[in-house]
């Protein structure tokens, strides 16, 4: 019986390894390391060697303490690995925030498929994997020939563990320009880039890749027949438990460096790529209207360092004085792309609870804009770090006039990734009542949300 699943979770900010109890979907242990970007040459890239050593040591230690029965993988999107004929990297894995792909943007735009085909908006830098590949092949003329296979990022780690290469539908369906979510097949860009024979076989996230390699078994002490599952894009990992346990309509907000809003069974709404909407592909292969912004990054930029937990008095001060943060601190993405951030009223000091309260309200209101742009209906589930931010949850409930629930998981992606492992499905993420909004503050929250929205609209006209 599979009980303990080791989940490799490579986020944009941190690399994690979580041991999850498969039956209860609770985390037994979580270890992390920073996802440091190395400067190059030939371009800024992820420290995969450092991650690999961290993961092997972590697997060894978790197995020694608790036992590891299976391994699953989840990672951030906008990332692919180019492998040579020996299965090694043909080039370092590009950091999608590197502006290099902008150099060839005009030529790339001439061949990329339209939004109507891919559900993938044109994003900055290398956020479209197609743009990354186009620029990399242009920058290194021999790279296309050296590249034997291209794997999406979860499957890069799967290949290192098993020697089996693959891509998965959720990672290809994450604004890559390489996937047609309506047809459930690769887009016309694959042929335009001459990758028909280079893209690794496309598989479902719950497919079993194979057992670990003998070298991995020897290094970690895991049983040689320990299975590894194909893997999944992190936001879709967060979504999976709710798809399996909840009746639509509802939306899930996955929070971290990126805040991703995903609507299941919502109202049919034309998506506007200018608002950073897109179509994600769920673990079951179904299209899911989505919108996103760099909420975790904006939180860190706005706060400028550690701060105490905001108090009710801090919140009341911000609401009563109508102190507001306006978008966007990370203007390269989100529903307010290109806008310059600023404060209305007396800007709270860095390191204060009042500033924390104001930023929480700001993040909730931008999240609400994302939800409105994708036709949200029903209740809302928040997972990840923002699920612990009470004022964020209260404002989101008020702004959307909806019940908001918090996920109880420390690492929201780990439960979804663990669910990929075979066995009886047990997904019951909502056990509590919805977040209760303080009755005294509710009129102030309603007034604040209305004024914030009015102010933002006026700035865009």
Image (cartoon, grey):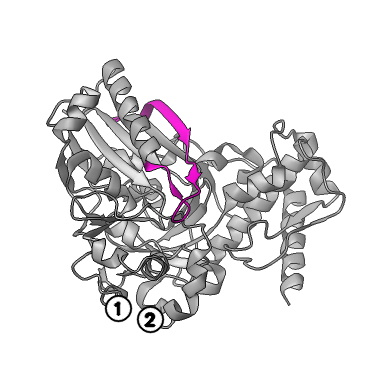
Q: Nearer the viewer, residue 411 or 251?
A: 411
Circle 2 — which element? loop
Q: Position of residue 292 (x, y in %)?
A: 52, 59
Q: Position of residue 201 (x, y in %)?
A: 18, 59
- Left or right side of 414 for 71: left
- 5 is higher (above) or lower (below) than 328: above
Residue 184 lies in quadrant: bottom left
Q: Residue at x 25, y 50 (%)?
A: 205
Disc ID at residue 208: none
Residue at 18 percent across and 25 percent down: it is: 218
Would residue 184 be found to the left or right of residue 126 on screen? left
Q: How many other residues sit within 10 Å of disc 2, few (<14), some (14-19) or many (≥20)?
A: few
Q: Which mark is residue 111?
A: 2
Proximity of marks 1 and 2: CB atoms separated by less than 8 Å? yes
Mark sitting earlier along the chain (1/2): 2
Number of residues whose C-alpha sits closer than 10 Å to that of mark 1, classed few (under 14), some (14–19) or many (20 or more): few
Q: Is residue 335 visible?
A: yes
Classify residue 293 by image quadrant. Answer: bottom right
Q: Can you say which quadrant of the picture contains the C terminus?
A: bottom right
Task: List the residue tagged with mark 1.
Answer: 192
For the N terminus, give its image quadrant: top left
**Is residue 423 in view?**
no
Asked whether 38 falls inside the magenta stretch, the response is yes
The residue tagged with tag 1: helix, strand or loop?
Answer: helix
Segment colored magenta: 21-48
**Could you say which is closer to the camera, residue 429 or residue 213?**
213
Q: Name the residue located 76 percent from the left edge and 72 percent from the top edge.
A: 458
């Amino acid at each position: 019986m599979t009980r303990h699943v080791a989940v490799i979770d490579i986020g944009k900010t941190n690399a994690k390894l979580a041991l999850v109890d498969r039956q209860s979907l609770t985390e037994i242990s979580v270890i992390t390391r920073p996802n440091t970007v190395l400067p190059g040459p030939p371009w800024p890239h992820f420290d995969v060697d450092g991650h690999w050593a961290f993961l092997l040591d972590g697997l060894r230690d978790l197995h020694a303490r608790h036992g590891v029965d299976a391994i699953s993988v989840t990672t951030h999107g906008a990332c692919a690995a180019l492998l040579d004929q020996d299965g090694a990297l043909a080039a370092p894995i590009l950091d999608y925030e590197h502006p290099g792909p902008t150099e060839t943007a005009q030529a790339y735009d001439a061949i990329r498929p339209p939004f109507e085909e891919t559900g993938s908006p044109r994003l900055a830098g290398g956020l479209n994997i197609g743009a990354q590949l186009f620029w990399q092949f242009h920058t290194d003329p021999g790279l296309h020939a050296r590249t034997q296979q291209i794997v999406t990022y979860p499957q890069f780690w799967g290949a290192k563990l098993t020697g089996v290469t693959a891509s998965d539908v959720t990672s290809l369906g994450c604004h890559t320009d390489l996937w047609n979510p309506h047809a459930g097949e690769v887009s016309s860009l694959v042929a335009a880039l001459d990758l028909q024979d280079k893209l690794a076989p496309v598989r479902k996230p719950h497919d079993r890749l194979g057992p670990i390699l003998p070298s991995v078994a020897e290094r970690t002490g895991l049983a040689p027949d320990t299975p590894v599952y194909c893997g999944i894009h992190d936001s879709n990992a967060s979504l999976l438990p709710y798809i399996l346990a909840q009746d639509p309509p509802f939306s899930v907000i996955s929070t971290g460096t990126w805040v991703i809003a995903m609507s299941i069974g919502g109202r049919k709404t034309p998506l506007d790529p200018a608002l950073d909407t897109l179509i994600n592909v769920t673990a079951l292969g179904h299209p899911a209207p989505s919108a996103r912004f760099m909420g975790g990054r904006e939180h860190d930029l706005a706060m400028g360092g550690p701060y105490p937990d905001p108090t009710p008095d801090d919140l009341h001060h911000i609401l009563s004085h109508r102190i507001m943060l306006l978008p966007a601190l990370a203007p390269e993405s989100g529903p307010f792309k290109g806008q310059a951030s600023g404060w209305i009223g007396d800007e709270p000091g860095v390191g204060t609870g009042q500033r924390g309260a104001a930023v929480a309200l700001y993040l909730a209101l931008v999240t609400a804009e994302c939800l409105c742009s994708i036709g949200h209906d029903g209740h809302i589930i928040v997972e990840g770090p923002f699920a612990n931010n009470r004022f964020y949850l209260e404002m989101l409930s008020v702004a959307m006039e909806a019940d908001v629930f918090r996920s109880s998981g420390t690492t929201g992606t780990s439960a979804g990734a663990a669910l990929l492992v075979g066995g009886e499905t047990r997904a019951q993420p909502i056990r509590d009542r919805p977040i209760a909004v303080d009755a005294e503050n509710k009129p102030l929250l309603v007034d604040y949300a209305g004024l914030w929205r009015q102010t933002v609209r006026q700035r865009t006209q």
